[in-house]
Amino acid sequence: MATFIDLPNEIILHVIQVIALDDIRNFAICCKQVYGLAEKIMEQHKRDKAMYSSVSLSLAYHNGDPGCLPAYSKLRVLSKSRRLRLYPKSVTVENYTLSGQGRRHRTVGNSEITDEVRRVCDSIFDELDSPYMDKDEMESWHDKVGGSEVGAANCLLLTLLPNVKSVFVWENDHFYSEMANIIHKISKTNEKASRQIWETLSLVKLQEVNIYSLGSSGRDTGKSGVMEAFMTLPSLRTVRGRHLGPGYTFDRWIYPDHCSNVTELHFRGCTLPVRHLARLFRYLKTLRIFSYDHSRIAEDPAEKYGPRELINTLCSFAGKTLTFLNYTSDARDKLRDHRKPSTATLHNFEALKTLRISRVILIAKRPPQRLVSELPSSLEELELVDPISAVEAEQMIEALLAMKQERFPNLRLIVFEGAIPFIADRIAAYERTGLVLDWRDIGADKIQKTGQDWLGGIKCERG
């Protein structure tokens, strides 16, 4: 009876070429014949994996520099090879418009580059078969990509990523409504797709999306709804944002009754009104991790950016599910008194295990005993970002120890910024009670004694 080994070598090679590298290794050890055929293919796979595991379409065009052409060529290669599409795990898309910059730099080189982009585009769409575009749409996308609309090229890339785990988006407001639309279409098509076409689908394994706003004030970006579109993908768990401003209103949900599977939100250097964050919280099934580095704090905590409103709003949506909270700010120098008291309380967070608080929460003007009384009883790790005096620290630690058995039975670690404000004997005495005191140098990543980079094992956007 004929077996697989009896097939012609050409057919065996074709089978080897279309399977994943790890599967090739396992397949190759079945016999000498297959190993001999697979050896060269494995070497090619290794080279392809190194080249395509992280893809960045840097499509910018400056002063006649044809540096954008390799990116278009890479897009062409991915569009033509389903095997190569399996490699990208991390993808970065940037939005610069070749044609717009070309209008400012009228040189012979620009025309040559534009013609080359059109030729690449013709090659891409010559055999492209996408579950996300019908024939008429294909023609429209051909014209956009061939017309040097970089945003269109980025949108096309997003339809070719079956195994990607993380996407980085540098967002301004050029073409990003189109990106939101294509992501919505990917999400909707994937939801209804049959198993027969599963291997052709994109973004089905996406776990993390990073949105970096390029707007000068943050007020003009975010209106495209790209973040909301990504959050409709069922595999997505983590959203990270940088320099997001009031333009991010989080009200562009195409499925208003749908809830996202995202469980982690990380924001750094952001200025998001609390009412906008409330819309975002409302769209989540479960929020477990929230990291927020605020670039502005209103002097009146009752205003729309204040810590009281944020903590109370967060608690109303995630009081029973939140396990990690990082809340910091760079607003120290922007307030006449950065230690202005806040009436917000953390006591109502029932599941909070790790807390990292900054100058917007650590208020020295109120007694440290009161601060301790407002901490949640579920707390296990506490990091104080603001430098604190020895007197304040001692009052706080004594209050914690007095209530440790009754209120904080699981509290085991307190981290200070800069240095532990106690002498060695006092530190040893506290640690004999089961409470480890540690410190992180200002601006450093690693905690000194325990060697941790991240409290709770959570990679947060630290301020």
Image: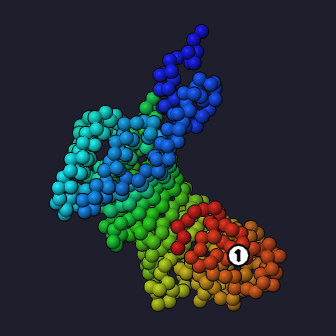
Q: Between residues 399 and 231, which one lies in front from this camera angle?
A: 231
The residue that mark 1 highlights is 438
- Residue 221 appears left or right of 302: left
Regarding residue 249, the answer to whether it shows in the image is: no
For residue 121, which quarter of the picture? top left
- Residue 186 appears left or right of 321: left
**What is the image's colouring?**
rainbow
Q: Residue at x 82, y 81 (%)?
A: 429
- Residue 326 appears left or right of 239: right
**Residue 146, x across and y down, in percent:** 24, 46
Q: Quadrant of the N terminus?
A: top right
Q: Residue at x 60, y 70 (%)?
A: 445
- Categorize mark 1 by other alpha carbons within 10 Å: few (<14), some (14-19), many (20+): many
For residue 58, which quarter of the picture? bottom left
- The correct choice, above or below, for 162 with respect to 170 in the image is above
- Residue 81 appears left or right of 394: left
The residue tagged with tag 1: helix, strand or loop?
A: strand
Q: Between residues 215 and 393, which one lies in front from this camera angle?
A: 215
Regarding residue 450, the answer to whether it shows in the image is: yes
Q: Between residues 448 and 339, which one lies in front from this camera angle?
A: 448
- The correct choice, above or below, for 403 with respect to 208 in the image is below
**Residue 231, x across and y down, in percent:** 44, 53
Q: Residue at x 71, y 69 (%)?
A: 450
**Residue 285, x across and y down, in percent:** 52, 54
Q: Between residues 299 and 331, which one lies in front from this camera angle?
A: 331
Q: Residue at x 54, y 27 (%)?
A: 37
Total labels: the figure holds 1
Q: The disc labelled 1 sits on which kind of residue? A: Asp
- The correct choice, above or below, for 156 with respect to 63 in the image is above
